[in-house]
Image (cartoon, coloured by chain):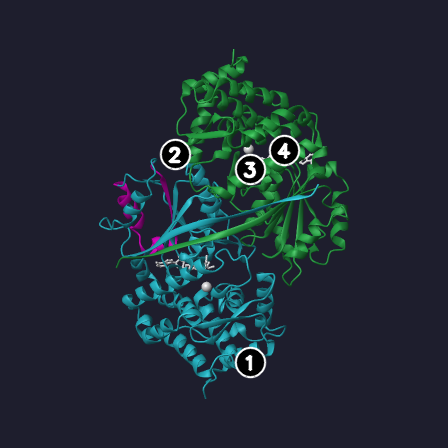
Chain colours: A cyan, B green
Amino acid sequence: MKSIIKQKFSVSYQYDIHFTSGLFTPENRLLSDFFIAQADGAVPKLLVVIDEGVVTHHPALVERIRDYFGSESAVQLIADVLLVPGGEAVKNQWEPVDRIIESVNRYGIDRHSYIMAIGGGAVLDAVGYAATVAHRGIRHLRVPTTVLSQNDSGMGVKNGINYRGKKNFIGTFSPPVAVFNDNLFLLTLNDRAWVSGISEAVKVALIKDAAFFDWIENHAASLRRRDSEAMDYLIFRCAELHLQHIAGADPFEFGSSRPLDFGHWSAHKLEQLSNFEVLHGEAVAIGIALDTVYSAIIDMLPPSDAQRVLTVLQELGLPIFHPLLESAGGGHPLLAGLEEFREHLGGRLTIMLLKAIGRGVEVHELDKENVLRAAAALQEGVNLVS
Amino acid sequence: MKSIIKQKFSVSYQYDIHFTSGLFTPENRLLSDFFIAQADGAVPKLLVVIDEGVVTHHPALVERIRDYFGSESAVQLIADVLLVPGGEAVKNQWEPVDRIIESVNRYGIDRHSYIMAIGGGAVLDAVGYAATVAHRGIRHLRVPTTVLSQNDSGMGVKNGINYRGKKNFIGTFSPPVAVFNDNLFLLTLNDRAWVSGISEAVKVALIKDAAFFDWIENHAASLRRRDSEAMDYLIFRCAELHLQHIAGADPFEFGSSRPLDFGHWSAHKLEQLSNFEVLHGEAVAIGIALDTVYSAIIDMLPPSDAQRVLTVLQELGLPIFHPLLESAGGGHPLLAGLEEFREHLGGRLTIMLLKAIGRGVEVHELDKENVLRAAAALQEGVNLVS
Ligand SMILES: NC(=O)c1ccc[n+]([C@@H]2O[C@H](COP(=O)([O-])OP(=O)(O)OC[C@H]3O[C@@H](n4cnc5c(N)ncnc54)[C@H](O)[C@@H]3O)[C@@H](O)[C@H]2O)c1
Ligand SMILES: NC(=O)c1ccc[n+]([C@@H]2O[C@H](COP(=O)([O-])OP(=O)(O)OC[C@H]3O[C@@H](n4cnc5c(N)ncnc54)[C@H](O)[C@@H]3O)[C@@H](O)[C@H]2O)c1
Ligand SMILES: [Zn+2]
Ligand SMILES: [Zn+2]
């Protein structure tokens, strides 16, 4: 006996990313309209989980949420709003995920109910994971509160938690049902957090959109001094480019190609070496600088273009090198990072480089000598066009 | 500021279900060919996880697997083959899932590696869950070893583990990369396990394929006395109908409709009441009997058709009633089960009934009186066509 059945199907996802100010002010009908539009007979429940770091800076938030939903009949807020630690802390332990699953059990949250996560990328990642695995998936809503999560991770399809110090070792691909970006949350970020999120926009502009890179160049000063209008545009355009990319290619990353990881292979290593002292966006800025200079060294990218990249990063207030990337006795940390990235991808090594501003190109090998040369150039602050 | 981006994309899945005899005999090139066809440059790793109940009955299995892959160059077997408890035990604890994730970490299993699960539906569910969440998804292969898992759960897209006694409270939707059904594994099942898996075939025939139901009627006696040829056909056709259904409708169950859950609402309750003493397939047989008689009582289904259903279940050696479904002082267990199913679905109650043999119809309410009347008829063994 030998026979076969070939199975084949597609699953479609649709979700809206809303951009607003003051999501939970009574006059703002966005959320209310969302739940009214979703109504299908029964009144769904809503479990809200918030980043403690957000609550510290917005102490009235929980009350405002209760007020907002108090008068809603299209959805039933679970009064017990959960608070979870912000930053990597939420991803480094089981407890917050466990507590969410426990609440799903206690409050009878079903697959037609909602779990809303309000917070930075780390909280969105952990809550998204809990929402995805409880009952094989409860509808999840994201309210990102940092620049990085509003322009990048909050739109995406990935979630995850850490395991034995390994970033995102456990997680799934699972799109949200809707995303609500509220620009007022960004006002309480400190300068470092504000600026570091911008590097994902520089990244996506460099590989996909030269005009957007020009715009960032022209607005580097206003972005750095926290001009809200400039940031609104940056977030909108960056989110749009990320979303187009996800929709266009391989959303659940079955292949090895990950263009949006431009600048990320060394960033992962640096974050880890610094014990996450270096912020993701800062590490990405350095990673972008490294791969840009590498692209120039191998004559793929004109040196003047590479110089523009370094200049804009510095004008934004982003770092382009870190001492932890210097050789330290044993092997060079960058070469170790490259090997780890190769293993992480499995299959074939694939790394994005630059051919021009706005035009990324994938390669399957990096030359070690030239990686070290690029790092040395950044360390010494060499002027590329000299 | 108020604006919106609408995101939309599809993710495609393809996998083959192979039917074979003696998957790990050296002459059988099916698995070998599979890995050769998948090759993409690097040699992937393969972590194998086996149901202890299977190993008990096939003590040479681990050695045969090592031999089989010993000469393979297209894949690298991790010598440390993991054994996990069979049946609900594997789903009732974190330990087996944890051990698999731990091995993923220890042996550097990446997203282009494979995890193969060999076992009954419970082991496939737990291993599938671990494989899906480790590194956000490692390619998983299923080798189902029971009738139920070969004709139903092994082809499907769901996995899961239990949590605080709640079945499948944690899990995901995540299709396998391939399924290998080996009919030799079925030889070591006891009679109860052999027969109980047949009820899923009766179920899918009743809602979708009258000709298949006729075939089951004609082969009830051979199936019961464990004729292999009859079982091969039953599994193939049942798998095919399940697969067509999944591909045709709502694979990840975003809506409330679950036609394949015909007969399952009361089955879930009975399994739970019996502490899983009653096998899933036995509970489903009783659930089919109940919803069939209910369909006749409300004049949806001709009584003679209902009688055919009861007769075939009995000829197969399947139960059609269980004393745990009798009223017990407080509320009736079936009415409680109906409420739990309503909650479980969230949104709108949707239950499949029969309009004819081979033709299911969904309804959104069951009449309590008639549910109890149907149960009483089964309990008393009333002849429906008298
Ligand atoms: N899922 C993805 O696709 C994806 C992509 C990129 C990054 N990430 C993840 O995102 C995380 C980083 O996210 P992040 O940069 O948003 O930072 P974060 O979530 O680590 O938060 C940093 C700090 O800011 C605080 N905070 C959040 N919002 C605030 C606000 N409005 N005002 C004041 N403080 C606030 C938090 O409490 C925390 O202490 C990492 O875990 C990374 O792995 C995920
Ligand atoms: N994921 C899905 O879509 C889906 C669908 C239906 C059922 N299920 C799940 O499947 C499970 C039931 O699966 P099942 O009926 O296959 O039984 P099982 O996995 O519970 O196994 C029953 C027993 O049979 C033993 N066994 C397995 N193969 C054997 C063999 N070849 N010879 C001898 N013994 C063997 C096991 O060790 C176990 O002790 C439940 O947990 C149920 O929730 C999942
Ligand atoms: Zn990033
Ligand atoms: Zn079933």
Query: Residue A102: x and y, percent?
Result: 46, 40
Residue A276 left/right relative to A144: right
Residue B52 left/right relative to B247: right
Q: Is residue B385 above or below residue A57?
A: above
Q: Nearer the viewer, mark 1 or mark 2?
A: 2
Disc 1 marks a residue whose amino acid type is: Arg
Disc 2 marks a residue whose amino acid type is: Arg
At mark 3, the secondary structure is: helix
**Residue B241 circle label:** 3
Query: Residue A331: x and y, percent?
Result: 62, 72
Q: Determine crowd level at label 4: few under 14, some 14-19, many 20+ residues with C-alpha closer than 10 A.
A: many
The chain letter for the residue carrying disc 3 is: B
Queried on whether the Cβ of the residue with tag 1 lies below 8 angstroms from ligand 3, the answer reads: no
Q: Which residues are magenta?
A: A43-71
At mark 2, the secondary structure is: loop
Marks 4 and 2 on same chain = yes
**Residue A373 circle label:** 1
Disc 3 marks a residue whose amino acid type is: Leu
Q: Determine crowd level at label 3: few under 14, some 14-19, many 20+ residues with C-alpha closer than 10 A.
A: many
Gap between marks 3 and 4 measured at Cα: 11 Å
Q: Determine crowd level at label 2: few under 14, some 14-19, many 20+ residues with C-alpha closer than 10 A.
A: some
Residue A61 is inside the magenta segment: yes
At mark 4, the secondary structure is: helix
Marks 1 and 2 on same chain = no
* Pointer 2 residue: B348
Gap between marks 4 and 1 measured at Cα: 65 Å
Marks 3 and 1 on same chain = no
* Pointer 4 residue: B234
Query: Residue A121: x and y, percent?
Result: 42, 57
At mark 1, the secondary structure is: helix
